[in-house]
């Protein structure tokens, strides 16, 4: 195997992600095993990426810098474990290590892919074209699995109680929902680049397939992801057509197709699971939008109608609609953090905060909002060190894009940007992105590819 093929396999691993997720579901549900094929394969991939970085560090200055950073990260985690073993009682070392393993996955894969893309770019390998293709194939597989699962009636339920939704053959509904939202803009980009006539819209079929799966999930993330992507294509096309004078067949065709899909989405909304789930959620919060005209008037002793003022929706209810009770857990973690020893405030409370022993059959609880979870788990010093590379390269690319917006306002940057922003938004509101290896590999590949493509790093 030559070195170029070896490097390509690191990127092509994206295609296998949905297959690993289905095998993971099978391992859990059919074999009742917590050690799944997906877990083993992803750990092996991370380990191989780490070995690759060490190998490249012999002759590559950038790789050496990344190795030094990762050694520092290991030290930060070691300090976290050492301090919390003295503070937390009981201290579940296996649970803590499992969480740290999930967190560092993004960092090792992201920094490794930076070197991989840099090496492939030097070999004249089109990193954007192939990354788009691999993500497109991953999205196509997910969409096909959802449709097959629905048609055969074998789809797993995404909710256990009053809400309705289906997760196909995937075990973790939150994670697959985040993946679909991140990959959907790439499917749109793939379709846009090949659609030159409105009468030939079939390149949008994989996009529609994945969108149907996202609607079947019954989550706000799924529905919102579709709407954001379609609006981005529509608004971007209008700007290109009207203000940038790009009156090409490609722009006109995709403008009309995106508008048509938005109309279809709006028309189908009342029949989607998320529509009923929103009403179920409103009911749990005692929020009613009933038509007062259909209700009989309430009369006082003199026969006059009593005007009942409608209660205003409180900020707490709005937050609950958005964060689905995560804001309550965040407040609890905040109280624990502010009352914790200074050592924990600097280096974090570790996994699940200052937990007590859970009841039998119950798991330790996280907030499920990635940035909050990482902050409380790693503290001020740990969080800044942990998120340094992510914030640095994100800021660097954003500055580069804004200073070159006239030449960079294209479908490529719009949709890769939307994919990245959706990932960050989901990480902030619903979690399961930066702390879930099955999801974080996608955002790692997107940020690494864009950074290297724009030559924002040097050897």
Image (cartoon, rainbow, N blue to C red):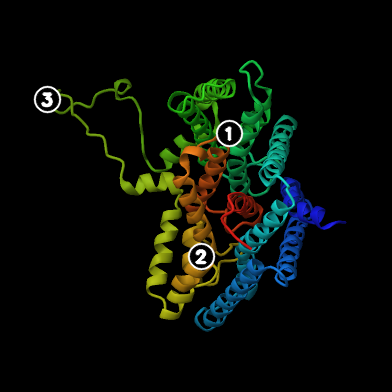
Instruction: Answer with the quarter of the image where residue 70 lies.
Output: bottom right
Marks 3 and 2: which is nearer the front? 2
Residue 182 is situated, as x and y percent measured from the top left of the image, at 59, 44
User: What quarter of the picture does the N terminus occupy?
Assistant: bottom right
Of residues 420 and 98, which is closer to you in this image? 420
Look at the numbered disc 1 and give the secondary structure of its residue.
helix
Marks 1 and 2: which is nearer the front? 2
Residue 291 is situated, as x and y percent measured from the top left of the image, at 33, 24
Q: Which mark is residue 388?
A: 2
User: What quarter of the picture does the C terminus occupy?
Assistant: bottom right
CA separation in Å, label 3 and label 2? 70 Å
Counting residues from the start of the chain, the first of labels 1 and 2 encountered is 1
Counting residues from the start of the chain, the first of labels 1 and 3 encountered is 1
Residue on which the image places disc 3: 302
Residue 17 is situated, as x and y percent measured from the top left of the image, at 72, 49
Give the crowd class for mark 1: few <14, some 14-19, many >=20 residues within 10 Å. Answer: many
Q: Residue furthest top?
A: 199
Residue on which the image places disc 1: 215
Tag 1–tag 2 contact (CB < 8 Å):
no
**In the figure, is residue 129 to the left or right of 435?**
right
Q: Residue furthest bottom?
A: 86
Residue 367 appears anywhere in the view: no
Q: Residue at x 72, y 29 (%)?
A: 151
């Amino acid at each position: 195997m030559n070195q170029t093929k070896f490097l390509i396999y690191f990127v092509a691993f994206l295609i296998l992600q949905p297959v690993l997720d289905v095998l993971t579901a099978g391992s859990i549900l059919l074999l009742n095993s917590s050690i799944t094929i997906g877990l083993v394969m992803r750990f092996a991939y991370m380990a191989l990426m780490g070995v690759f970085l060490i190998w490249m560090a012999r002759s590559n200055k950038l790789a050496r810098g990344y190795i030094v950073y990762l050694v520092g990260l290991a030290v930060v985690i070691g300090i976290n474990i050492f301090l919390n073993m003295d503070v937390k009682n009981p201290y579940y070392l296996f649970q803590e290590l499992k969480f740290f393993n999930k967190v560092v996955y993004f960092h090792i894969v992201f920094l490794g892919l930076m070197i991989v893309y840099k090496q492939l770019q030097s070999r004249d390998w089109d990193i954007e074209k192939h990354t788009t293709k691999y993500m497109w194939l991953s999205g196509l597989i997910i969409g096909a699995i959802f449709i097959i699962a629905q048609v055969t009636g074998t789809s797993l339920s995404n909710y256990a109680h009053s809400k309705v939704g289906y997760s196909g053959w995937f075990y973790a509904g939150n994670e697959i929902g985040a993946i679909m939202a991140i990959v959907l803009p790439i499917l749109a980009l793939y379709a846009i680049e090949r659609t030159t006539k409105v009468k030939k819209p079939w390149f949008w079929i994989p996009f529609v397939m994945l969108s149907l799966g996202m609607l079947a999930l019954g989550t706000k993330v799924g529905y919102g992801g579709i709407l954001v992507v379609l609006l981005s294509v529509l608004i971007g096309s209008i700007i290109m057509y009207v203000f940038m004078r790009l009156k090409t067949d490609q722009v006109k065709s995709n403008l009309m197709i995106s508008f048509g899909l938005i109309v279809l989405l709006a028309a189908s909304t009342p029949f989607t699971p998320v529509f009923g789930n929103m009403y179920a959620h409103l009911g749990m919060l005692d929020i009613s939008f009933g038509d007062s005209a259909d209700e009989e008037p309430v009369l006082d002793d003199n026969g006059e109608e009593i005007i009942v003022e409608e209660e205003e929706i409180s900020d707490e209810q709005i937050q609950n609609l958005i964060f689905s009770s995560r804001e309550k857990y965040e407040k609890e973690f905040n109280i624990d953090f502010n009352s914790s020893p200074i050592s924990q405030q600097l280096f974090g409370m570790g996994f699940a905060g200052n937990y007590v022993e859970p009841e039998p059959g119950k798991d330790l609880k996280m907030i499920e909002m990635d940035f909050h979870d990482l902050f409380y788990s790693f503290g001020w010093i740990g969080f800044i060190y942990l998120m340094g590379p992510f914030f640095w390269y994100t800021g660097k690319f954003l500055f580069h894009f804004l200073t070159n917006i006239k030449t960079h306002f294209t479908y490529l940057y719009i949709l890769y940007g939307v994919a990245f922003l959706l990932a960050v938004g989901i990480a902030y509101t619903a979690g399961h992105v930066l702390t879930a290896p099955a999801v974080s590999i996608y955002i790692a590949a997107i940020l690494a590819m864009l950074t290297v493509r724009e030559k924002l790093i040097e050897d």
